[in-house]
């Protein structure tokens, strides 16, 4: 049986996770959700992995919830509906909280839960052909499970429009409202993702984890005396780590830090 989620890790530690139901535009069904969660947990635990890129096979990134499963859920008991919803909700939380940088490589149709995946990733790069829709209200439901991540990405004001209208918007609008960080032509998407990964790898792996955790802590916190104390305590702890000592030493000695891949001989020649 074909796996609904594919993954591979290259020699540089780049992990690619592919949603693999192209015949239904990578719609999320329970089995796919379980496979995605299992895959992401394994990659998070793998010390060789430096970043995770999420892509969609075929013409679309992700069409959101699987219509066939939604049809079956109409006959679920309240308990069965809750358990199914909880399982799917965990997908977005795991992506959001993963202790590795996550990058959404977005193309084609992105609907409902697909928008949630994009919003939950740390970085989202889209091709100019991508289109987005939060169409839940048109099905008589609401985008509840993805709401924490989408509202964080695009803000309450934009969410009020797109959650309520269920209208389609293009990549330019997704960029304008903050869902995408960058837009490129379809043929340039892979190269742009490579550039982003190269930038990520200039930072210390543990420092990136700290940075992600800090954003989550302060994003919706009030700023007061306790915030000053907490941030001072946190940075004091980070500065004492071996990674921070290596980073500072490299800066003062005008060399690359240990975690930065050396420039190949070919690239050195080109620079000359």
Image (cartoon, helix red, strand yellow):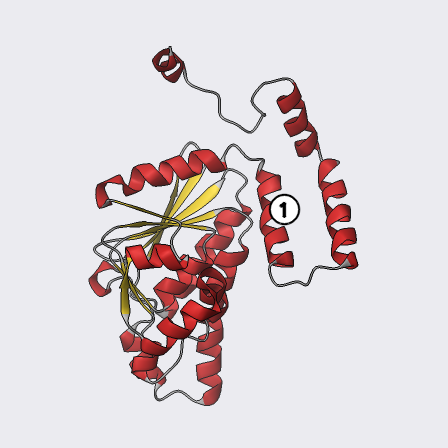
Given residues 19 and 38, the one toward you in this image is 19
Question: Mark 1: which secondary structure?
Answer: helix
The answer to whether 11 is drawn above or below residue 180 in the figure is above
Pick the residue in front: 130 or 92: 130
Closer to the camera in the image, 162 or 45? 162
Task: Classify residue 191 by image quadrant.
Answer: top left
Q: Quadrant of the N terminus?
A: bottom left
Q: Which residue is mark 1?
A: 210
Question: Considering the image in quadrants, where does the C terminus appear?
Answer: top left
- Relative vertical location of residue 259 with respect to residue 135 in this rendering, above or below: above
Q: Where 102 sits versus 243, above or below?
A: below
Q: Quadrant of residue 203?
A: top right
Q: Is residue 146 something that shows in the picture? A: no
User: Residue 77: where, in percent of width, then height?
Assistant: 43, 89
Residue 241 visible in the shown view: yes
Place of residue 157 in the rendered image (x, y in percent of width and height, measured from the top left): 45, 70
Q: Residue at x 48, y 78 (%)?
A: 83
- Left or right, residue 200 beside residue 6: right
Q: Residue at x 29, y 81 (%)?
A: 138
State the image quarter where residue 131 is shown. bottom left
The image position of residue 78, as x and y in percent, is 46, 88
Q: What residue is shown at x 29% (from left), y 56% (from top)?
A: 171
Q: Is residue 49 above or below residue 167?
A: above
Q: Number of numbered discs present?
A: 1
In-front residue for pair 61/182 = 182
């Amino acid at each position: 049986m074909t796996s609904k989620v594919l993954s591979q890790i290259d020699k540089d530690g780049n992990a690619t996770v592919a949603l693999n139901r192209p015949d239904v535009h990578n719609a999320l069904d329970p089995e796919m959700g379980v496979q995605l969660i299992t895959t992401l947990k394994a990659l998070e635990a793998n010390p060789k992995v430096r970043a995770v890129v999420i892509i969609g096979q075929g013409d679309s990134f992700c069409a959101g919830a699987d219509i066939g499963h939604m049809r079956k859920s109409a006959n679920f008991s309240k308990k069965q509906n809750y358990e199914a919803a909880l399982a799917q909700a965990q997908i977005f939380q795991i992506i959001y909280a993963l202790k590795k940088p996550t990058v959404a490589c977005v193309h084609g149709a992105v609907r409902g839960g697909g928008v949630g995946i994009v919003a939950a990733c740390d970085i989202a790069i889209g091709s100019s052909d991508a289109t987005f829709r939060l169409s839940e209200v048109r099905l008589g439901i609401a985008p509840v499970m993805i709401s924490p991540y989408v509202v964080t990405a695009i803000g309450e004001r934009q969410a009020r429009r797109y959650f309520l209208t269920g209208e389609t918007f293009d990549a330019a609008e997704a960029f304008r409202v903050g869902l995408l960080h960058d837009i490129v032509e379809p043929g340039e998407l892979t190269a742009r993702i490579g550039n982003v990964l190269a930038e990520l790898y200039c930072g210390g792996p543990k420092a990136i984890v700290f940075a992600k955790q800090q954003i989550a802590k302060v994003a919706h916190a009030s700023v007061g005396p306790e915030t000053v104390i907490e941030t001072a305590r946190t940075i004091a702890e980070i500065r004492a780590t071996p990674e921070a000592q290596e980073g500072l030493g490299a800066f003062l000695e005008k060399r690359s830090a240990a975690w930065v891949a050396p420039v190949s001989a070919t690239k050195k020649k080109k620079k000359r």
